Structure formats: structure tokens, C-alpha cells
Image (cartoon, rainbow, N blue to C red):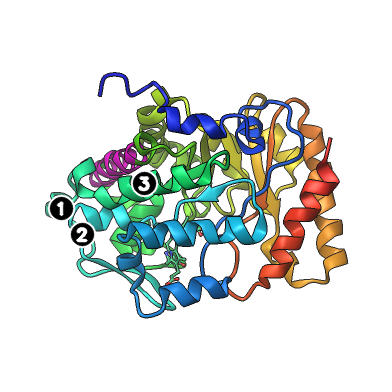
Amino acid sequence: PAGAARPPARRGAAHDSAFLRACRNEPVPHTPVWFMRQAGRSLPEYLKVREGIPMLDSCMRPELVKEITLQPVRRHKVDAAIFFSDIVVPLKAVGIDVDIKPGVGPVIADPIRTRADLQRLRPLEPSDVPYITEAVGLLVDELGSTPLIGFAGAPYTLASYLVEGGPSKNHERTKAMMYGEPELWAELVDRLAVITAGFLKVQIEAGVSAVQLFDSWVGSLAPDDYRRFVMPASTRVFDAVAEYGVPRIHFGVGTGELLSLMGQVGADVVGVDWRVPLHEAARRVGPGKALQGNLDPAVLFAPTKVVETRAREVLHSASALGTSGHVFNLGHGVLPSMDPDALSRLVAFVHEASAR
Ligand code: 1CP
């Protein structure tokens, strides 16, 4: 729509936050920190409010979404909130029969495997997700100067759930389509790019300050296959939201060999897992992009002294980024069995150890 590139006034309060400054490669008073999956099963207050409410139902209740999104901000004093939702919410919103089964993850009733199946993947309209617009609005009002990060799943990762029918270790059916029926694959990821871009636009129009595109499982691909089968669709997503000027973060797991390409699809900030040190990631990604990461989540199960030593090493590695920004995060999500107090201590430590 006309004027969409103008940031809504409500996003203004967070403009000078450490998180957004780091995303823009500007100097910061301290290194900002947030955690992927910071809202959720590691928090007793989350388990309490979710009791008896199925996961995807909870994503459609704005007051509940607001409460769950705020819980880790209150408890851990993180520098950014991540909107409570899931990567399969936009798929459900366009009519895909998907459920999130406890202990399993997303399960698709009728997987997408043929050309005829593609018809079910129509573009997402704002009117499909009024509860998203409402929840983002409530949160932006409440968060004030703390930025809210919106997110979506990237075409490859969404395709994997849709083609396999659920979580998968080897992505064999997905890759069989990609390698064996490249034209069908191209149309599938293109349709997913349109849905994903639509979902991010709804969140940005409603006031989120940044967006993260999760391509969690893309690390299963070789660089040449990433270039050929994934880059065009992911680029389409980033291009579609470029005009808003909000920082765009791109993250995947096991993407050491893909970091340079993942920067090229249009991200302003590249997320790095724990397998590649940040100074090496910076060399691969190239100048001008901020990095996010990358403490091994499992380190949080070690004694506090060890967590602090390892966190200091991440900060030290990031000091080689020069004028590029650093957002401290884990290399992947918080695990359900993690001690919430260890996470709170880590936030305080990162703030203290990085204070300029
Ligand atoms: O009942 C529950 O509590 C179910 C657990 C759960 C939660 C808390 C799921 C099911 N989704 C979520 C919320 C969620 N999912 C958030 C917001 C919370 C936050 O980050 O603080 C986000 C950003 C996601 C994104 C998501 N969902 C990703 C990308 C991030 C990542 O971890 O790589 C993926 C891959 C999913 C799919 C998904 N949804 C849920 C599960 C258990 C899974 C993974 C299943 C699998 O292993 O394939």
C-alpha cells in the first residue's frame, strides 16, 4: 500500500535501543542480548498460562500472546522481545490443516507433494490474521522502548514440514522433490515466499521493529543447491519487506558453509550457530552486516563460571567485527530443560562485561 515505507510512529520509541543500534552497525552502550525461543517451555509462568490451551489456539489469543511475549522480558531483562507465534501459523491461516503436537512439533494432515497440492497455498491477506495485528499492537504499546521482533519461517524450512508432513531428520522427501522435480519445487518455494512475505508485512505494518527469517533446517544443503533451489525464494521474501527499512535478520542451524550466501539474500543481520566463531563468520559474511549469536545453548547446563568464560569468548570474538554490530544470542533456541535463572544471569553478565 502507498506510504507503507514510512515507519509507523509507534515504532519510534525503540529506535535508539541497543538492539536496533547494533542491527544498524551503530555504536552501543552495551552489547544487546535476546534468546531464540526465550518465550516458552523453560518458564514455569509460561507452562501455567498455557495449561489446557493447544499451541496454535494460544497463538490466536492476543491477550495471551502479549503475556507470553512479555514474560522473558520481565524475567531476564533481555534487550528485545520476540513475538510469540509459530512458523506454521501463516500456513494454518491460508487453510492448511496443521497441528502442533506436544513433544513432536508441527504435523500436516495432508502433505504437499504434487502440482495439484500447490493450489492450497494461496497468498496470505491481512484479514486472514487479525489476531496477529491486534497482538502486535497491544505489545508495542506495552513494550515502549523495548523493540519487538517479528518473524516467519523461510521457504525451505516451511517446505520441509509441508512435504514431509512433520519434523524430519533427513528431509528426504523434500530433497527428492527438489532434486527430482525442480520445476514443481520452484513453484512451491515461490508460493511459500509470497505467504511468508505477507506474514512479515502484517507484523511490520502493525509495528514490529525488526524481523527474523528462520531457515532452521537449510544447513542440510550444499552451497550449490542452496544457490540454485533456495536463494531465489528467500531473496524474494527479503526484497518484499525491504521498503520498510526495519532490520532483517536471517538465521539457520549448521549453516557455516552457507553464511556468505545467506548474507547475499538481503539480510542486514546474519545469525550464526555455535559451530563457527564470530570473527570467522564475519570473514565469510563480508563487511557491512551485523552478526547475531552464538553461544552453544548446551553451555547453559555447565557451572556459572564456565558460562561466563564462554560468553566472554563470544564477546571477544565479536570484538573483531570492527564497525559491524553484534547482537548476543544463543547459537540456537533455549531448551525446555534450561534453568531460567542461568539465562537471567547470562543477560546480566553480557551487559556488564560489554559495557562501554
Ligand atoms: O506447546 C508448546 O509450548 C510447543 C513448543 C513451541 C513453542 C513455544 C512450538 C512448537 N513453537 C513455539 C513458539 C515459537 N516457535 C516461537 C516463539 C517463541 C520464542 O522464540 O521465544 C518461535 C520463534 C518459533 C519458531 C519455530 N517453530 C521454528 C524456528 C526456530 C527454531 O527453533 O529453529 C521452528 C523450526 C518451529 C517449528 C516448531 N514449532 C514447535 C516445535 C517443537 C517446532 C520444532 C519441531 C522440529 O523439531 O522440527
Instruction: Say which label, 1 or 2, has the lower sequence index.
Output: 2
Whether residue 176 appears in this view of the structure is no
How would you rate the neighbour count of disc 2 (Cα within 10 Å): few for under 14, some for 14-19, many for 20 or more?
Answer: many
Residue in the picture at 22% in, 70% down: 109
Label disc, if present, on residue 155 of the rendered structure: 3
Mark 3–mark 2 distance (CA, rounded to whole Å): 15 Å
Mark 3–mark 1 distance (CA, rounded to whole Å): 15 Å
How would you rate the neighbour count of disc 1 (Cα within 10 Å): few for under 14, some for 14-19, many for 20 or more?
Answer: few
Label disc, if present, on residue 120 of the rendered structure: 1
Mark 1–mark 2 distance (CA, rounded to whole Å): 7 Å
Frontmost residue, 322 versus 55: 55
Q: Is residue 306 above or below residue 353?
A: below
Residue in the picture at 54% in, 41% down: 147
Mark 1 and mark 2 in contact? Answer it, CB < 8 Å.
Answer: yes
Question: Does the beta carbon of the residue at mark 3 sit less than 8 Å from ligand 1?
Answer: no
> In this rendering, would 66 be left or right of 144?
left
- Magenta stretch contains residue 192: yes
Residue in the picture at 58% in, 48% down: 255
Dominant secondary structure of the magenta stretch? helix
Question: Does the beta carbon of the residue at mark 2 sit less than 8 Å from ligand 1?
Answer: no
Q: Is residue 95 above or below residue 284?
A: below
> In this rendering, would 9 be left or right of 327?
left
Magenta-colored span: 184-202
Identify which amino acid the numbered label 3 is placed on.
Pro
Element at label 3: helix
Q: Position of residue 218 (x, y in %)?
A: 48, 51
Q: Position of residue 258 (x, y in %)?
A: 56, 42
Instruction: Say which label, 3 or 2, has the lower sequence index.
Output: 2
Mark 3 and mark 1 in contact? Answer it, CB < 8 Å.
Answer: no
Q: Quadrant of the C terminus?
A: top right
Whether residue 207 appears in this view of the structure is yes
Frontmost residue, 27 versus 152: 27
